[in-house]
Image (spheres, rainbow, N blue to C red):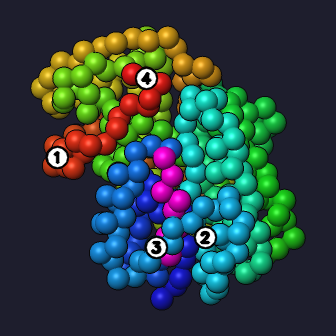
């Protein structure tokens, strides 16, 4: 059985990818279980993953070279490293830039060095639509121009992670693939992301915090579409950068309206000052993903939200202790 390493294994995307592929690969999951958002949700995911016999877990901070050195034998006989571990969020990156530099840049460099050392065949390094900034009416294409002027600290750390990886592995035979994700949501999602927060706040009759007027639009992409995109990368054996996003964009106000219909409840809106470096619209170009990988999203936002609402209702007791607000939002 093929052996792979998945970092960020207790994160949203890592958890869902492993669940979908636990019978296909021998999977070593790595996660620091940091406090970027509520650790209780990460532990809940880990409990679920530990039920799979082909899954084993290492509690590691990849930015710590000493920790990684002690456990570096986990990379022996590994065919692919899927690097999903990161600290996400534009607004929070301005509050704690050092943590983002360590978790997104230093950790990625340390991992790439081990990929090189162990001559691993493929390195998939997850990136983000945040590096594109505000696209306006234009579609964000997978070129390198935007890396020269990333619009936030979070985007800068992810962009530099891409650049470091390409430089470290330049003279190797390792296939480097960079998926750039656009606003991922769904069951077991991050509690700091808008859709899950909105569901929780509306369901529990709390104020729904919106930064700005709610007309900013995003390419909301359902988690199963992201997992299917990653599966396509595992099948494709050449280097490349690919956007994984939805064909449509929806405003936050439109998202709230869909959630209201699903819950049959009215949201209590609290508009706050627009967040730093927040953008109006991000549109992905899917030309490469469609033509090269034969991938495109299949789950529309209305179906995706319905699935997420049903999941939330099922797990509402387990989610009672999960924090859906940052300390600075109180």
Residue 303 image point, x, y percent? 26, 41
Residue picked out by circle 2 = 81
Residue 126 image point, x, y percent? 60, 54
Q: Of 79 and 282, which appears nearest the observer?
A: 79
Residue in the image at 26% along x and 43% along y: 321
Residue 38 image point, x, y percent? 40, 45
Which numbered circle lies on residue 110?
none
Q: Is residue 219 left or right of residue 47?
A: right
Residue, far left = 264
Residue, far right = 171
Ranked by sequence position, the earlier of labels 4 and 1 is: 1
Residue picked out by circle 4 = 329
Q: Is residue 186 above or below residue 53?
A: above
Secondary structure beneath dot 4 equals helix
Ranked by sequence position, the earlier of labels 4 and 2 is: 2
Measured Cα–Cα span from mark 2 to mark 1: 35 Å
Secondary structure beneath dot 2 equals strand
């Amino acid at each position: 059985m093929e052996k792979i390493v998945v970092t960020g294994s207790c994160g949203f995307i890592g958890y869902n990818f492993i669940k979908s592929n636990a019978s296909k690969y021998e999977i070593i999951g790595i996660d620091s279980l940091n406090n970027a958002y509520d650790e209780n949700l990460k532990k809940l995911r880990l409990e679920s993953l530990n039920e799979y016999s082909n899954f084993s877990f290492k509690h590691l901070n990849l930015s710590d070279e000493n920790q990684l050195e002690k456990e570096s034998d986990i990379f022996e006989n590994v065919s692919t490293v899927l690097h999903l571990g990161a600290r996400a969020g534009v607004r929070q990156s301005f509050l704690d830039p050092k943590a983002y530099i360590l978790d997104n840049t230093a950790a990625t460099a340390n991992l790439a060095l081990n990929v090189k050392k162990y001559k691993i065949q493929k390195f998939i390094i997850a990136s983000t639509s945040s590096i594109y900034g505000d696209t306006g009416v234009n579609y964000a294409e997978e070129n390198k121009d935007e890396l020269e002027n990333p619009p936030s600290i979070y985007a800068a750390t992810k962009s530099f992670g891409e650049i470091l990886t390409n430089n470290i592995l330049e003279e190797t035979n390792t296939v480097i693939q960079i998926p750039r994700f656009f606003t991922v949501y769904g069951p077991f999602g991050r509690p700091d992301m808008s859709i899950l927060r909105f569901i929780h706040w509306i369901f529990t009759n709390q104020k729904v915090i919106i930064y700005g007027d709610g007309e900013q639009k995003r390419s909301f992409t359902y988690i199963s579409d992201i997992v299917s995109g990653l599966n396509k990368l595992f099948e494709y054996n050449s280097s490349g950068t690919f956007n994984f996003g939805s064909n449509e964009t929806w405003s936050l106000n439109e998202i709230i309206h869909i959630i209201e219909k699903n819950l049959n409840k009215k949201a209590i809106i609290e508009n706050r000052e627009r967040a730093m470096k927040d953008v109006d619209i991000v549109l992905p170009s899917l030309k490469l993903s469609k033509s090269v990988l034969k991938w495109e999203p299949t789950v529309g936002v209305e179906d995706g939200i319905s699935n997420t609402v049903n999941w939330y209702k099922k797990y509402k007791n387990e989610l009672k202790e999960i924090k859906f607000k940052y300390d600075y939002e109180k």
